[in-house]
Amino acid sequence: MPDLLNEHACFGGVQRFHSFDSQAIGLPMRYSVYLPPGAGDKPLPVLFYLAGLTCTEETFMIKAGAQRVAAEEGIILVAPDTSPRGAGVPGETDNWDFGVGAGFYVDAVQEPWSRHYRMYSHILELRQLVLDTLPADPARVGIFGHSMGGLGALMLALRNPDLFRSVSAFAPIAAPMRCPWGRKAFGGYLGPDEALWRQYDATELMAGMQGAPFPGGILIDQGLADKFLAEQLYPEAFEAACLGVGQPLTLRRHAGYDHGYYFISTFVEDHLRFHRRVLG
Ligand SMILES: N[C@@H](CCC(=O)N[C@@H](CS)C(=O)NCC(=O)O)C(=O)O
């Protein structure tokens, strides 16, 4: 069972921070939960948010301003951490885009990362923990995320469309095999086998689909003043893959917006309402 670290009343509901002994990671892991008012009366939809490089389970809850709309729509929000903490891998804090804060939502197979850096399994484990411990409806679980977490959300949803029934992203690393962040992370965690890399690449996964896995559509927001857009993100590659398999995609390009949480907080309401509409 998870430990409760602290809780705060918020928009008539409650914001909580938890820790639990993660079997997937082999270490304690933190996560945050927002429970809207009235939780417990009936099963509610749940929305997982995967954060980007350098973030923690706290970033989204303090910076995105999503709780007001979650309270209104009756959505439970859950935010995991972005990597193991305290794994003790030599050099794990040397880079901000690899190691601590940069788990990339993959299960590492390369030593010395493979023992604890298993964030793919961790997200699935956390999904189950949430369903076991909160008044959550297992048929109405969605996922979204930002940058590295936008990749994580698209990838996890495409690999598990029965577990995550709606998906959206902010400025996702949409084609990680084509960009420096993705190639560094996949090389380090997964080794040289690019067939394995493809299982974690949202564009490759979408291109390999038979038909549209999300007939209710996918929503992506991208700022055009995002300094990472040209080199790291490749939303146009994901867009082309969606077109190729008939997957409905709304890719909104916003002039003037950058990569940060001022951008996310501007459009987060649209994402919550989108998920609520798809999940019912
Ligand atoms: N440290 C990097 C930036 C890392 C970054 O932008 N992280 C994004 C996710 S990819 C983020 O959400 N950072 C936390 C924040 O903005 O609060 C830099 O110096 O350029």
Image (cartoon, rainbow, N blue to C red):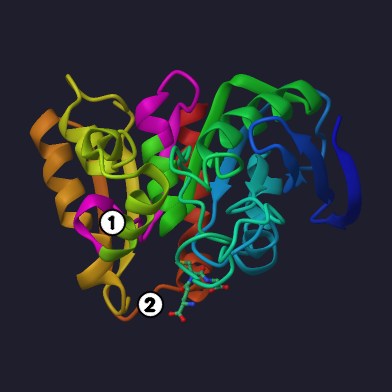
Q: Nearer the viewer, residue 187 or 49?
A: 187
Which residue is painted at 58% across and 36% down in the image? 123
Q: Amino acid at mark 2?
A: Asp
Q: Residues within 10 Å of mark 2 (few under 14, many from 20)?
A: some
Q: Which residue is mark 2?
A: 258
Which residue is painted at 48% across and 65% down in the image? 264
Residue interval drawn in magenta: 156-179
Is 231 on the left or on the right of 113, as rendered?
Answer: left
Q: Amino acid at mark 1?
A: Arg
Is 254 on the left or on the right of 11, as rendered?
Answer: left
Q: Which residue is mark 1?
A: 183
Residue 78, by quadrant, is: top right
Examine the rendered structure and indicate whether residue 190 appears above or below residue 90. Answer: above
Residue 223, by quadrant, is: bottom left
Mark 1 against mark 2, which lies toward the viewer? 1
Q: Position of residue 155 (x, y in %)?
A: 37, 38
